[in-house]
Amino acid sequence: MTSMSEKRVFSSRLLSCLVAVSMFFLILSCSLLFRAGDSSLVPRSIYNLIVVDGGSVEPKSSSCKEFCAESEPVKRVTSCDPSQALLKVFMYDLPPEFHFGLLGWKGNLNQIWPKVGNFSDVPRYPGGLNLQHSIEYWLTLDLLSSLTPNVARACSAVLVHNSSQADVVFVPFFSSLSYNRHSKIEGDETKSTNDILQERLVEYLNSRDEWKRSGGKDHVIMAHHPNSMLIARWKLGSAMFILADFGRYSDQIANVDKDVIAPYKHVVRSIDPKNSPPFEERPTLVYFQGAIYRKDGGVIRQELYYLMKDEEDVHFTFGSAVGGGTRKASTGMTASKFCLNIAGDTPSSNRLFDAIVSHCVPVIISDEIELPYEDVLDYSKFSIFVRSSDACKDGYLLKLLRGIKKEKWTEMWENLKQVAPHFEYQYPSRPGDAVDMIWKAVSRKVSTVNYKAHRRNRYNMSKKFLNVH
């Protein structure tokens, strides 16, 4: 009887061992299958979602969809090496009322910045047309994330805590949002909140040793909305501004030598290059939808409207962002071969960047326009430039565009698909996206400023020696 019992125990243990060994080999086989690379039955993209750094993965939360729709799933990676970054940036710890407080964010006592490692903790930027000037938001988030180990990012710029180690000093004032939300005088106020914040900013900067040391020349200030910083710009003009264009600035305050032009954030949805309609599937020759009656350089819109409105293959109508206007514009641009970007109240508009991400060849009719990254991007490879004086000649513009053959248009369309990622704002930033490209543009400006400063200093040391002796 005892012998039978011992045999059963032995059999049970043997079976357990066999099951354990089988499970071990099954797990090992699955792991090898996942790591098999391109020859695996499991696509590498799926493998990356399953096994990343020992099974750790940071998925996009639902709350992130509003502001990082274009982002890839974010994997846990090691923070970038600061010594490899193009720019070392010192950022002032301005009170939240200058930045994320304008979004309604309230941190804990003495907390200046939101935590950005967890997407659910990142304050959202308001939608609609506010988004087109949201550059301040994306750049500030990117700098904060440079100190957050679990955020994969482009790593062109990193935050440093010592201003003496920095290439530039970053001023985190959400000036466009301040203008959009707080430029009107409310109630019994004698000044708007926007004006008060600008005055306080000027006072703050003038008191800082960093500003005094360089006269503000190594400071980066964001003023993307053309009406932002109307008070402060006259007192802070020595700094490097990040702007949409120079339309409402004097040459003494802003110019191409020291300042950076940044793209608007597009408001239409981006097209996947694989699903971008080719020449034959874009029945509309020319597309424009927007405000037609504008002042200043924008009067040309009215002239072009009367020249083109009755053409069968032209869509030239009034439109706005409300009432589904953005969705209609997205559909219309995707169905068009050429999209007009005509000067409005200022030389630039968001319409150019909507066209680029719609892979609709931009036709730029704005003689005073300045374009983002034009020192590294040749816009003539994917855009058509027409002088305003020529565009207003009867029949000129349509003859020009109808004369562009399918082969040439397709070449420009292919180029558009290549450059479109350079105009995407997203968090976290990615190599070659808008945030990364802006930091690189800032780096190039710093090099130019340093070059000029070094030339000015050629004989300064000799003068000092003479004074000493």
Image (cartoon, helix red, strand yellow):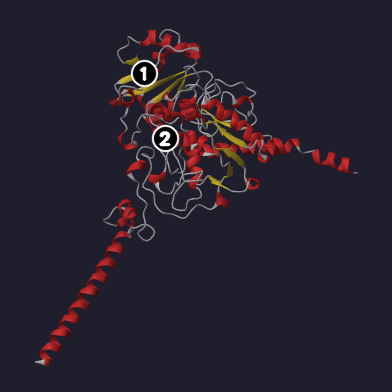
Q: Would you say residue 438 is visible in this rendering?
A: yes
Count of numbered tags: 2
Q: Which residue is mark 1?
A: 289
- Mark 1 Cα shell of 10 Å, populated few (<14), some (14-19), many (≥20): many
Which disc is residue 125 wearing? Answer: 2
Asked whether the residues under the numbered discs 2 and 1 touch, taking CB atoms below 8 Å apart as contact, a structural biologist would say no
Residue 298 position in % (x across, y down): 47, 14
Q: CA distance from mark 2 to mark 1?
A: 25 Å
Q: Amino acid at mark 1?
A: Gln
Looking at the picture, tell me which residue is in the foreground, 364 or 5: 5
Q: Amino acid at mark 2?
A: Tyr
Instruction: State the SS at label 1.
Output: strand
Q: Toward which corner of the image does residue 68 lie, by quadrant?
A: top left
Tag in front: 2 or 1: 2
Extreme bottom residue here? 2
Instruction: State the SS at label 2.
Output: loop
